[in-house]
Each structure stands twice: as C-alpha cells, then as structure tokens.
Image (cartoon, rainbow, N blue to C red):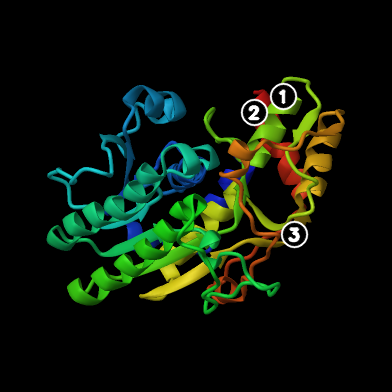
Amino acid sequence: MPYADDVKRAAESLLPWEKLSGKNILITGATGMIGSTLIDVLMSHAPLDFHVYASGRNESKVAAVFSKYARNPHFHFVRYDVREPLESDVCFHYMIAGAGVASPQLYSTDPVSVIKSNLWGVDNLLSYGAKNGLEKFLYISSGEIYGEGDGRVFSEDYSGYVNCATLRACYPSAKRATESLCIAYGHQFSIDVSIARPCHVYGPHFTDSDKRVYAQFIRNVLRKEDIVMKSTGSQYRSWCYAVDCATALLFILLKGENGEAYNIADESSNITIKELAEMVAGIGNRKVVIDLPDEAEKQGFNIVTKSLYSTEKLRSLGWTCNGSMLDKMKSTIEALQG
C-alpha cells in the first residue's frame, strides 16, 4: 500500500533518533489522524528501542486503530481523558499533545469542551511532566491561531486577528491561550517546549465524526456519491499530507528550538476548496455539487478566506516535503478502500 510505503520512508528520515533511545513517549489524541499517523511512523522505525504510549479515552477504539501493535512490547495504551489530572507511575520523557476537540460541528454545539480539552489538557500534562522528569514537550497547535489574516502568507511571528466574542473563536482562542501556557510552563519550570502549527491536514486516519471538508469529500467518493460542497469553494488553503505532517512533528520534537513555534504545510499544495473537491471527485469519478449551508451550519465554518503558511523556519531544521498532492490524495483514498 502506498500509505505503508510513505510511513516506512518517514521512519527512515535523517533525524537524531538516538535521543529517543530508552525513552518513553506519550502521545495524546492517539486515534486522531495526526496522532495515529505519528504512531505508525514511530512504530515503524528501526531499531525500535523506545516505548510509545498511546493515550485515549476509548480502549476499544485504540485497540482497533492499533491492532497491529497489540503484541508489540514497545506499544502501550493509556486510558486517559486529558481534561482530568494525569495519574501514572511512568516517567514520560517526551510528551506530544495532540488531544483536543477540533470538529467544526462542536464549535457551535459544545464550545466549552473545545476550550477545556485544549487548555486544561495541556495544563494537566505539563503539571505531571514538571514533577516527573519530562525532557521535551511538543504541543500540536493550529494555524488557526493566525485568525482572519490580512492576505499575507503566515509566518510564525505574525499574530493575526481573532474576534474573541464569537462562538467560532472557541477553537483559535483555545489554541492561542494554550500556546501561551506552554511558554509559561517552559519558563517557570525549565521545561523544553516547542509548538507545531499544522495547516489543514489530510490522510487516511480521520474519524467518523470528523466533519472537516476533506473528510466529507472523501466519504462522498467512498460511498460512490457526488461531492457536496457547502460553499462556492473560493477559500484558499495550505494543505499537508498526514505522513509529511508526522515527519515534521518529529523534526520539531528532536531538532526544534526551545520556546519556538513552527508552521507545518506543504507549500506545493496551496489550493482552493473547490480545487480540492474537484481533485477528490476526479479520483472517484464523481462530480461536485454545491449546496449552500443554513445559518446553523455556518456557525462552525472557518471564515478565513486565505490561509497560506510559510515553512522556511521548519525547513531550516532539515525537513523536506516531496511528491504531488494528487498522488498523496490517491494514497489516502486507496488506504481507506482497504
């Protein structure tokens, strides 16, 4: 399978893997698309001389996603809701915080959980880590912290604009506040902290509840349906394949500077939502249908019209991104077809 080949290549990236030797790595949000892809890459690395702890609330879901690692002594499940204090007897040398509600539907129906899962979740992790030998903390934030933007390509020193007095602000505001919390912990407790800001990421491990556009488009073609687009599709976005994103996270984890944030994007995959819909439809031999949303649906939508990311800072760490978005989207759909 192309996805498996992509994961294998990622696991062979030129990185200081020796930093992980003998270490325990906790990954929250393990069954999410980014978390599960990252775990696939880590578990594919040879020699596998470290321990991966996959954190999630649902043991059966984790067992299903990672069934191939069930008998591997280097893989461990941690039943944990990040909104609660972490209780464990394990020294997690590395923590990668990927848990946090990121469903547009919930931005209007359960915005409180969106904020708590991000802010409280990271506070609980860093509180535990500060007392138990944490060596490096990587927070998976979001490019949504840049807000509406002003037409420029986003670099890490741009602060952007978010109207905090809106429901939709629950997500970018939570990410912004949590980034600040990471920096505060790093300073006050001498913890090495780095922040990743992924753009829109696609790959085969999205969940049934994922309502983001790429997931809905792919579900359409897998069901042999036409793609239903809830806008005119003029929004311009940076995209990144999940395996490329996972590789970038490892570069940030192992080579990223303390207290620094890094954008993650494939700058060759800057396209409009309409172009994305047409790409996925073309792979599935379907057509694109426009069905404009009602007012309730609009509340969860990303209002940003242009969201493009500079990756100069990430590339300075040695990270590269090769291959076409079309081929990677084909790999994604093929993996989902089994």
Going 49% across and 41% down the picture, which residue do you hit? 108
Can you say whether 303 is above or below 316 in the image? above
Q: Amino acid at mark 1?
A: Leu
Q: Quadrant of the N terminus?
A: top right
Question: How far from the left and from the top, in percent, is residue 209?
Answer: 52, 30
Between 288 and 169, which is closer to the camera in this rendering?
169
- Whether residue 2 appears in this view of the structure is no
Q: Amino acid at mark 2?
A: Leu
Between 44 and 128, which is closer to the camera in this rendering?
128
Residue 262 as seen in the image, left or right of residue 241: left
**CA distance for labels 1 and 3:** 24 Å
Please name the residue that numbered disc 3 is placed on.
270
Among numbered discs 1 and 3, the one appearing first in the sequence? 1
Question: How far from the left and from the top, in percent, is residue 77?
Answer: 30, 34
Residue 23 as seen in the image, left or right of residue 208: left
- Whether residue 56 appears in this view of the structure is yes
The quarter holding residue 282 reads top right
Going 65% across and 59% down the picture, which residue do you hit? 304
Question: Label 2 crowding class (10 Å Cα cut-off): few <14, some 14-19, many 20+?
Answer: some
Can you say whether 51 is above or below 22 in the image? above
Please name the residue that numbered disc 2 is placed on.
336
